[in-house]
Amino acid sequence: MAIQEQDLSAAPDVTWRAAAHPESPLAQGMRRLRKSTTALIGAGIVAVLLVVALFADVLAPQSPIASDQTHTFERPSRDFPLGTDQLGRDMLSRIIHGSRISLAIGVSSVLLALFVGVPFGLIAGYYGGRVDSLIMRVMDLILAFPIYLLAIILMVIFAPTAGLIGTIKVTGAIAIVRIPIYARLVRGSVLSIKEKEYIEACRALGVRDPRILLRHILPNCLAPIIVTTTLGIATSIIVEATLSFLGLGTQPPTPSWGWDLKANVSFIQSNPWISLFPGIAIFVTVLGFNLFGDGLRDALDPRLK
């Protein structure tokens, strides 16, 4: 009886402690994320890709641009695990180094679009009126073009080149295409958040608009921004591969999955592996980011408990 009474007397204290220290929304999201098999698989794929890209010089068995005419169209073997192309270049080394280009362009283009689109969305949604109309009409003009068509037009204007300058041009073209996505996303969130009571209280207390935007509104927009950013990286990688396949993206001798598909597609019947493996690399990379993004969306959705 004494033990039972002690347990009963301790129960209200435990309940009070749980109520006094509720789990934060971030902690709830992380807990759901750890329980999501989809998110964990996607995160694992992305982690492996990042390691491959960072340590490409160590992992690649040969130079990705060195050609050897004595070993052209080699089938997959111990010396060439993924075979060689028409110039005798090791496909495994090219795919490993190509991950750097795909991830670099995918991540940097999304971040650039993020840093431009988010401020436009904040300003348009918060101030409204003519400012909102002007910004949104510009965004609508960009969105009027299909994403691939606009990217092709921009790359024709930029004139694709080899090396770092060419990579920067591709990154800029993809970023411009994606700016309206973040601007419209943030604007929609701001329109609902700015009507909240605590925003009205900040205005009544004389808090300046930049502080309200950065301190009180932007943090409440982060969940959809994070999810869209993760999924946007996958889309940017596909756009980069498409541009390279059309000859408007990354230029040789820089290793690129899209360019390898373009260069080897004419040999797909006689030597299918040289086109198969770059395609698989694109597929696995996009799948990883999509799975991780879907898991993040489910974990950060406030309607889920």
Image (tube, rainbow, N blue to C red):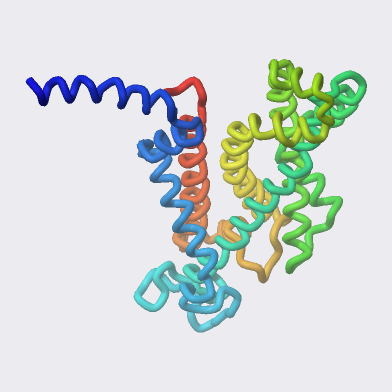
The residue that appears at 49% across and 55% down in the rendered structure is 281
In this rendering, the count of numbered labels is 0
The residue that appears at 37% across and 27% down in the rendered structure is 18
The residue that appears at 49% across and 76% down in the rendered structure is 58
Where's residue 53, x and y in %?
54, 64
Which image quarter: residue 213? top right
Question: 207 above or below 87?
Answer: above
Quadrant where the image shows the N terminus: top left
Q: Nearer the viewer, residue 169 or 149?
A: 169
Which image quarter: residue 153? top right
Question: 179 above or below 106?
Answer: above
Q: Is residue 268 visible?
A: no
Quadrant where the image shows the C terminus: top left
Where's residue 296, x and y in %?
49, 36
Where's residue 52, x and y in %?
49, 64
Which image quarter: residue 89? bottom right
The residue that appears at 55% across and 78% down in the rendered structure is 63
Q: Nearer the viewer, residue 150 or 189?
A: 189
